Image: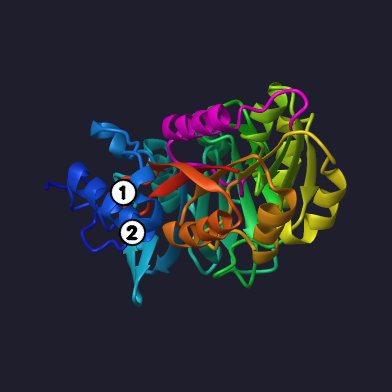
């Protein structure tokens, strides 16, 4: 397979970029059949995009940075002890590549600006510096702010985080350098610089529509939405007249969710820690529904036990980014009497080994 221009062969980021679309999807489906073997007959064909759309799609990135006295700034990914620069990565969307190259040309030397990471989420970008003190910002003069104004960026942040590493963000140390603190995504939802976003809106729309069609919330129904993010699903349930509660850990996501879905009750915290409030909210009678979109680790044990044995929704939609933890959680639900009606895979990350699956269960 011929790689597009800008693809760095040594980059550790996209392990399927040497495969054709068919070969990549075949590997992903084989992996899902093995991981989800007890329910393999429920697997639908993988939902995907085709052609050039499989490139230049990534609008959420996290790149490590390194200053070199000879060559200046490098933005890329680490491979062992070497940073592999990928300023022209063909998987990144063009606005991301343009901003990356602009920053490499524009930022002051590393001795003056201890940049460790560059994070972009849609139209919001963050420079993470490993210092507790705000570095010199004279580089962002009026001329350069005018250049940003012609870009597709709407907010540029500085985040002073001296311990940045595995954990990129801290609560404090934030400064908006330029632009607006919130943007709107393809669905009109407000989000901030740390927001989680699915990479391919068209596929995500399909997944949301499939979940909504299955759950079919309506007035009189009560739906709990766990790990609800900025509210892309909450707003769907409230528009249909359902009684809705959401739980999300990220403070920024909770703020946005309350703006995006004002008719939903939204709790901040770990889902396991909000089970008492979920119990108080749960009606004694009527149809109960559940939508979950947990991290790679899957449902917390206490949440799984509450959902399967206490809340007992009549229908459940579970969007998973890990087939391994999904399999473990599905086993628990089936032992509690649930039937897996469908498993719909989505290729949200072309060129990589990652695949997500929407599981639809009925009691």
Q: Using the rendered view, name the quadrant where residue 184 is placed.
A: top right
Instruction: Name which residue lies at 42% across and 45% down.
Output: 102
Quadrant into which the C terminus falls: top right
Q: Which residue is mark 2?
A: 13
Q: Nearer the viewer, residue 57 or 238?
A: 238
Work out which residue is located at the far bottom of the displayed protein and give it.
81
Residue 168 seen anywhere in this rendered image of the structure: yes
Label 2, label 1: how far apart the Cα atoms are: 10 Å
Q: Which mark is residue 89?
A: 1
The colour scheme of the drawn protein is rainbow
Task: Check whether the beta carbons of the residues at disc 2 and disc 1 lie within 8 A of each other.
Answer: yes
Q: Secondary structure at mark 1?
A: loop
Instruction: Name which residue lies at 75% across and 23% down.
Output: 219
Residue 213 rendering spot, x and y as whole percentages: 54, 27
Q: Which mark is residue 347?
A: none
Work out which residue is located at the far front of the displayed protein and give it.
337
Numbered disc in front, either 2 or 1 = 2
Q: Nearer the viewer, residue 17 or 94?
A: 17
Residue 322 rendering spot, x and y as whole percentages: 45, 57
Instruction: Name which residue lies at 49% across and 56% down.
Output: 326
Residue 4 seen anywhere in this rendered image of the structure: no
Does the magenta segment cover residue 209? Answer: yes
Q: Which residues are magenta?
A: 193-221
Within 10 Å of disc 1 (Cα), the crowding (few <14, some 14-19, many 20+) is many
């Amino acid at each position: 397979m011929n790689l597009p221009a800008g693809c760095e062969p040594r980059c550790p980021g996209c392990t399927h970029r040497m495969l054709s679309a068919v070969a990549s999807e075949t590997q992903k489906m084989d992996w899902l059949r093995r991981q989800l073997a007890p329910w393999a007959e429920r697997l639908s064909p993988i939902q995907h995009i085709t052609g050039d759309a499989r490139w230049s799609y990534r609008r959420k990135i996290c790149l490590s940075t390194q200053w070199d006295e000879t060559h200046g700034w490098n933005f890329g990914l680490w491979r062992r002890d070497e940073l592999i620069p990928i300023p022209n990565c063909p998987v990144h969307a063009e606005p991301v590549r343009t901003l990356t190259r602009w920053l490499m040309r524009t930022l002051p030397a590393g001795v003056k600006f201890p940049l460790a990471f560059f994070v972009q989420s849609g139209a919001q970008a963050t420079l993470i510096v490993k210092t507790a003190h705000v570095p010199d910002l004279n580089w962002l003069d009026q001329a350069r702010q005018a250049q940003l104004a012609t870009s597709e960026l709407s907010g540029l942040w500085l985040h002073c985080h001296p311990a940045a590493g595995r954990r990129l963000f801290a609560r404090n140390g934030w400064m908006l350098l330029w632009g607006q603190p919130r943007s709107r995504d393809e669905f009109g939802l407000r989000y901030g610089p740390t927001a989680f976003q699915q990479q391919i809106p068209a596929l995500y729309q399909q997944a949301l529509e499939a979940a909504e069609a299955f759950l079919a919330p309506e007035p009189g129904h009560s739906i709990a939405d766990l790990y609800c993010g900025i509210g892309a699903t909450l707003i769907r349930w409230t528009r249909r007249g359902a009684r809705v509660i959401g739980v999300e850990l990220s403070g920024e996501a909770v703020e946005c969710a309350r703006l995006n879905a004002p008719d939903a009750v939204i709790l901040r915290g770990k889902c396991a820690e909000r089970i008492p409030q979920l119990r108080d909210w749960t009606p004694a009678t009527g149809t109960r529904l559940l939508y979950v979109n947990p991290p790679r680790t899957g449902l917390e044990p206490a949440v799984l036990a509450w959902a399967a044995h206490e809340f007992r929704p009549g229908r459940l939609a579970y969007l998973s980014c890990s087939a391994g933890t999904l399999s473990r959680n599905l086993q628990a639900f089936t032992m509690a009497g649930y039937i897996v009606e469908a498993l719909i895979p989505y290729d949200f990350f072309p060129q990589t080994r990652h695949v997500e699956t929407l599981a639809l269960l009925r009691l």
